[in-house]
Amino acid sequence: MSDNTDPIGQFLAGERDRQTAFLAELVKTPSDNPPGDTAPHAERTAMLLEALGLTVERHPVPEQLARANGMISASNLVVRHRFGDGPVIALNAHGDVVPPGDGWTQDPYGAAIVDGWMVGRGVAVSKSDIASYTWALLALRASGLPLRGTVELHFTYDEEAGGEIGPGLLLSEGISKPDYAIGAGFSYAVVNAHNGALHLEVEVRGRSAHAAKPATGIDALEAATAILSRLYAWRRSLAERVSSVPGIGSPQMTVGLIRGGINTNVVPDRVAFRIDRRMTPEEQGEAVESELRQVIEDAARSYPDAKVTIRRILLAEPLTPLPGSERISAALCAEASRIMGETVGTTGTPLYTDARHYAAHRVPIVLYGAGPHSIEEANAHRADERLPLSDLFKATEVVARTLANLLG
């Protein structure tokens, strides 16, 4: 995998047990979002980083701001190491994770190692990159190479809630002003573009009535069903809009949450549902929202007695490459192709990530990090999320060597 006489490869080869133990501690400490009480995990991570000899800046998010973003607590961690005059490169990974859900064959917080794979919630998305980026920095510090510039680690805790009080806050408040950035990703692709997402909540209000005389009420569920039927029929047309970016595909729409009603024997007076509309890099958020609202409003006209309101929950614009990102991509692809043992190129992904916050501040960013070939292979956001430790070690070396290239 590397020349043993090389200081980066030699250092990392001797650190594998310690890096594995560090990642296990991150997995064993829950950081589910929701509910989003992630400040304790941030503090645990900070203590682990300080035990490695790193200086950690803690930037707690005010409680009121955290709650306004649907969380209980959050804190952002920044580690900076200056090697000399030169560019600032930020490495961003998030420590919050989706709740485990059902179907696990291993303890989701156990960090068990099965056939060379660590299993646990967040082990691939993206606690592994807290480990890979940390050890990439440690390797550079130990290498003695004549580097110019600064490496910053940005470990944030609100990606699952949108990233506004994580990277969004670090950048908008000027806590960090990087020249380039690398965000959490997978080992066998460098992602330079990704989808955006629009989340809308649709609320349909009617009037309750006894089920013995439903005509005396206004059935919110009946009106909501008509809107949903129109949305699902319209969704089929999205398949015709194929992105030109490899790996993206077509726009998507999902109704992921619905609630309402009072009791079985009562005409529902209120139904609310939430829509996830994934946007390709060619699409613009405002135009997408306008079209989707029009579909809903057109369907609602068939039920004039029902009151329909539409509220935006989230608008995350797609990621498109910025000038300068090709330099990071080229360096990562060259090192990854050599170390991973197969050709690694640039691609897009239908996910959306915190990378968009860096792009919004005109910071060129691409995604690369530890993990297997795909989110499916990692069981990301599913039971038995897993990571091959061999990929963790290889990806760490890729990142370290890429940073050495860019700062050399």
Image: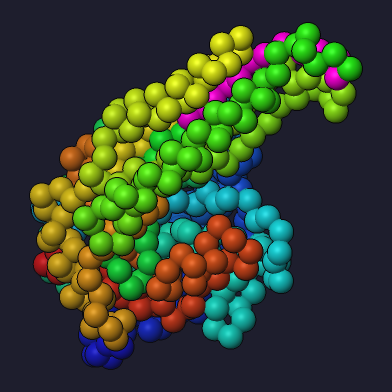
Q: Is residue 155 visible?
A: no
- Give coordinates of residue 43: x percent, y percent: 54, 47
- Give coordinates of residue 392: x percent, y percent: 42, 74
Of the pair 51 and 372, the residue shown nearer to us: 372
Q: Is residue 184 left or right of residue 324?
A: right
Residue depicted at x 26% and y 40% = 283
Q: Is residue 334 visible?
A: yes
Residue 57, located in which quarter of the rendered image? top left
Residue 246, located in which quarter of the rendered image? bottom left
Residue 335, located in which quarter of the rendered image? bottom left
Of the pair 396 and 353, the residue shown nearer to us: 353
Residue depicted at x 60% and y 71% = 119
Quarter of the rendering occupied by the N terminus: bottom left
Q: Is residue 121 left or right of residue 209?
A: left
In reply to whether residue 206 is colored magenta, the answer given is yes
- Give coordinates of residue 29: x percent, y percent: 62, 56
Quarter of the rendering occupied by the C terminus: bottom left
- Give coordinates of residue 134: x percent, y percent: 38, 63
Q: Which residues are magenta?
A: 200-211
Q: How is the image coloured?
A: rainbow
Residue depicted at x 80% and y 22% = 262
Q: Is residue 385 above or below residue 365?
A: below
Q: Is residue 20 above or below residue 156?
A: below
Disc tally is: 0
